[in-house]
Amino acid sequence: MIARVILVGAGDHGRGVLEILLARREAGLPAPEPVGFVDDGPRRHATRPGGVPVLGPVDMLLERREPDLGIVLAIASADAKRALAARLEPAGLPYVTIVHPSAILGRGTTVAPGAIVGAGVVVAYDTRIEPHVTINLNATVGHDCLVGEFATIAPGVNVTGRVTIGAGAEIQTNATIVPGVTVGENARVGPGSVVLRDVPAGVAVFGNPARVMPQVPRELDA
């Protein structure tokens, strides 16, 4: 049983993940005790975001061997999550799934280890959320969707039914994905965009309707 958890990343998104954990505990729901953060930013060491200490750099987890300890990648950037997961693989620490008490998950929906589901999120029935996915504040995900590993869905996004979000894709704030569309692996959908057709892997799109753009600014906290 995972009784304690260390959060990887002490930035703004890490604070948000801590809030989800604390909300679960305050609601009397199962949740591991947050031991602290690890972060590679020296300026964050010895600080206490949200009252929880930053214990040191990420690599300190490679030395931890405690049977009741888990971790979660408390970072929004898909690229950063993927890199950290590879870096921490030798540690063999289990990943914790974190779902806010106010989130609604429909029947048949599954949430894999390491996924984070924020406050106000609604996920319809028979949707699969893979490892290390982040679905942030007040986003909605329709029925029969697949959200691939390391993907991030930002606040206010509306993903409708039978949509596939590829591994590592980033859907930024208030974007809308219409039914049946596939967003390819590592693609990015810019803020407020309306996606009416499939987005190829690795492509950045922006606008209404969304069109391929050479650059879409990143809005996600790493």
Image (cartoon, rainbow, N blue to C red):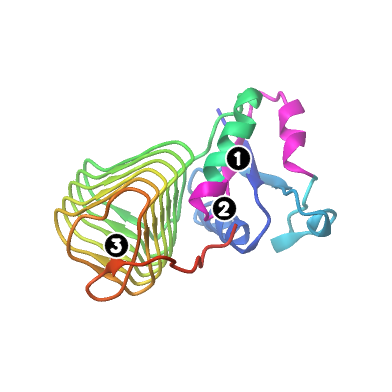
User: Quick check: marks 1 and 2 in contact, CB under 8 Å?
Assistant: yes
Between label 1 and label 3, give the one nearer the viewer: 1
- Lateral position of residue 188 relative to residue 178, left or right: right
Q: Earlier in the sequence, mark 1 or mark 2?
A: 2
Label 2: element kind? loop
Q: Earlier in the sequence, mark 2 or mark 3?
A: 2
The amino acid marked with disc number 1 is Leu
Q: Crowding near pointer 1: few (<14 within 10 Å), some, many (20+)?
A: some
Per the rendering, the mark at residue 188 is: none
Instruction: Let me know if residue 124 is in the magenta part.
Output: no
Q: Which residue is mark 1?
A: 84
Label total for image: 3
The amino acid marked with disc number 3 is Thr
> Residue 71 lies in what quarter of the image?
top right
Q: Vertically, is 180 above or below 114?
A: below
Q: Earlier in the sequence, mark 1 or mark 3?
A: 1
Q: Which residue is mark 2?
A: 75
Q: Crowding near pointer 3: few (<14 within 10 Å), some, many (20+)?
A: many
Of 7 and 204, the residue lying toward us: 204
The amino acid marked with disc number 2 is Ile
Between label 2 and label 3, give the one nearer the viewer: 2
